Image (tube, helix red, strand yellow):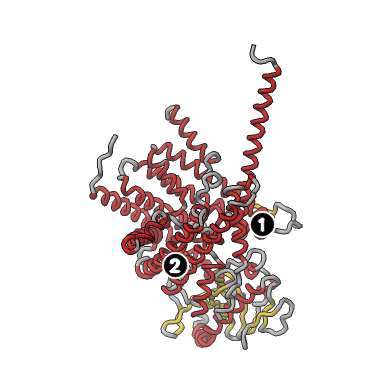
Amino acid sequence: MRGELIWIFASACLINNFTLTYFLGLCPFFGVTGRLATALRLGLANIFVMTITAGAAWLLERFVLPWVPYLRLISFILVIASTVQFVEMLIRKTSPALFRALGIYLPLITTNCAILGLALFATNRGYGLLASVIYALGAGVGLLLALVLMASLREEAALAPVPRLVRGTALSFFVAGILSLAFMGFAGLFHGVVE
Amino acid sequence: MREREPGPWRLILTLGGAGWLAGALLVGVYLATDPSIQRNRARALFAAAQRVLPGAERIEAWLFKEGEPVRYEGPRDVPPPPGALFAGYGPDGTLVGVAIPAEGPGFQDTIRLVYGFDPQRRLVIGLEVLESRETPGLGDKIAYDPDFLANFGALEVEPEVVAVRRGEKRRPHEVDCITGATISSEAVVAILNRSLEAWLPRLERAAERMRERTGA
Amino acid sequence: MSGPVRESAWREFAKGWWRENPVFIAVLGLCPALAVTASLRNALVMSGATAFVLIGASLVVSALRHVVPRQVRISVYIVVIATLVTAVDFALAAWMPVAHRELGAFIALIVVNCLILGRQEAFASKNRPVLALADAAGMAGGFALSLCMIGAVRELLGNGRVLGLRVLPAAYEPWAVMILPPGGFFALGLLLTVFAWLRERAEQRRRAEQARVAAAARSGGGAP
């Protein structure tokens, strides 16, 4: 059981990194990775929202959706939107400093496909509550890792002499491709822990 | 032109109306498509079971209810609940074997497969990968490499299935791995062993009951 | 339909294909553009599903643009989009089970394709249904065009085939990384570079032409 949880975490975080192998959450990946500090903060907020969403999605899938399967998408989106609102209010009450830092990024998370993707994947795989939450943590940490790596690389690349033709968006795609290639090296990791 | 501020009732009414309409539309779509979706799933399951049980003509789903194997009597165009086994009967009504769905972690992601087991001879007699995201061109060969799949034509399961390097299969409980896809091949073997370990103790009794139904 | 309307409808339709292409120019809807383009067939199914949702949502939103109060408009758009996506999801599962299995959760993820919500907010909610239809159809066409280009490049290089038919000789060693996730990034980066190069060349040619005309005018002794 413990082995399985480790594998679920590693799989979501490294082997099947949401951004680099499922292409989820590419908007913030290309949008906010101009600066390392903002990327870090957005990544942390994401982990938080993902974990709550995973728990809520499990509850819905277990207790509500067996009776109304056609409301799956709508209910997931509603949960995500309300979670983000709730998190926003919570942070504003408890830590105004963090709220100012995260401010604009929180609403952005609602339209982040990584969150909906997480809810869909976790329920499609039939994970239990604990496995769902571990999966969410793994996916969130993986997203944070991808954001931070990408931001660091882009901060470096801004100073590098790059051919004029690939400067800008094309360069970001090539960098992302190389990162994705590097993450493929994690395949097979923790392969033995389940037995 | 300035718009008048709409009252809260107007907002609630709009949202409620949109939700109600959406719900009504979805119920309609659901009722129209659900039978086909269920039938597709059930067909895929039964067809896979038939493919891993060579010689089987009729497939029946079985379930364990409070430890007792019972035949699943549900309609044919709805997939049986998870945890079901599939008994395959030959043209003369004898039990050819039992198809068992199994899943576990692969190189990339969860591998889902189904294998056929002959309880009489205690042999694996067929295996099919239903779903994998293994590396295209390497690991995904577990799903279609004929030499690899031939390993599971008559594979002994005692003491346990062992993965060996390609061409080194000597004993009937060994599996030749795919060159360049050792981990994916080993993953298939590991899934097989775990599933067998869980099912074998109960399978004897189930097979007995399944045989009793012969000719029914 | 009167002349000016037809003309502006045509303009709205034409812009999405290339000049304001959602993927190549606006860089929207990347998730499906990269996730399901390992083969041209999947790209085609995804394009069709997205087009249905985009056009349907644009028509509904445009028709209701005077009814829906501003404060709740985003929620209403999302409900409309999610409803259409769920319908497509069920329809594909019922009638195209193989394609549905290959695309998996990415069909449901059309809901969060920023292209669709973006068009509702930027265009359909402000224009009448004819124009909204033209805009949505153009954008859907541009989206399909880019998905198919990426899918064709990836399938050709990664598999030596297009639509499952062998195009490159059997001696071609498939560049398997192109059908793996990194290949999506590389293919899109490659296409963007090629487009940048083409644009630059066209620009140079235009300048050379201008210079030639100017030179000819000078040597001709100027205007009489």
Q: Is residue B98 shown to the viewer in this render?
A: yes
Residue with the mark numbered 2: A123
Left-right relation of A170 to B170: left
| Image mark for residue C158 | 1
Q: Is residue A187 above or below residue B94?
A: above
Query: Please, which chain is the residue tagged with disc 1 on?
Result: C
Location of residue B128 in the rendering, given as x and y in whole percent from the top left corner: 60, 72
Whether the residues at callouts 2 and 1 have beta carbons within 8 Å, the answer is: no
A133 or B43, nearer to the observer:
A133
B54 or B92, nearer to the observer:
B54
Please give the name of the residue rendered at 72% of the width and 76% of the height, measured from the top-left corner.
Answer: B166
Query: Please, which chain is the residue tagged with disc 2 on?
Result: A
Picture quadrant of residue C159: bottom right
Please give the name of the residue rendered at 67% of the width and 27% of the height, measured from the top-left corner.
Answer: C211
Please give the name of the residue rendered at 54% of the width and 64% of the height, measured from the top-left corner.
Answer: A17
Q: Are the residues under badges 2 and 1 in a single subunit?
A: no
Distance from label 2 to label 1 (Cα)?
32 Å
Q: Is residue C115 above or below residue A81?
A: above
Residue neighbourhood size for the residue with mark 1, other residues' Cα within 10 Å, grouped as few (<14), some (14–19), many (≥20): many
The amino acid on which the numbered mark 2 sits, given as a three-letter code, is Thr
The amino acid on which the numbered mark 1 sits, given as a three-letter code, is Gly
Location of residue B165 in the rendering, given as x and y in whole percent from the top left corner: 71, 78
A19 or B150, nearer to the observer:
A19
Image quarter hosting the N terminus of chain B? top left
> What element does badge 1 sit on?
helix
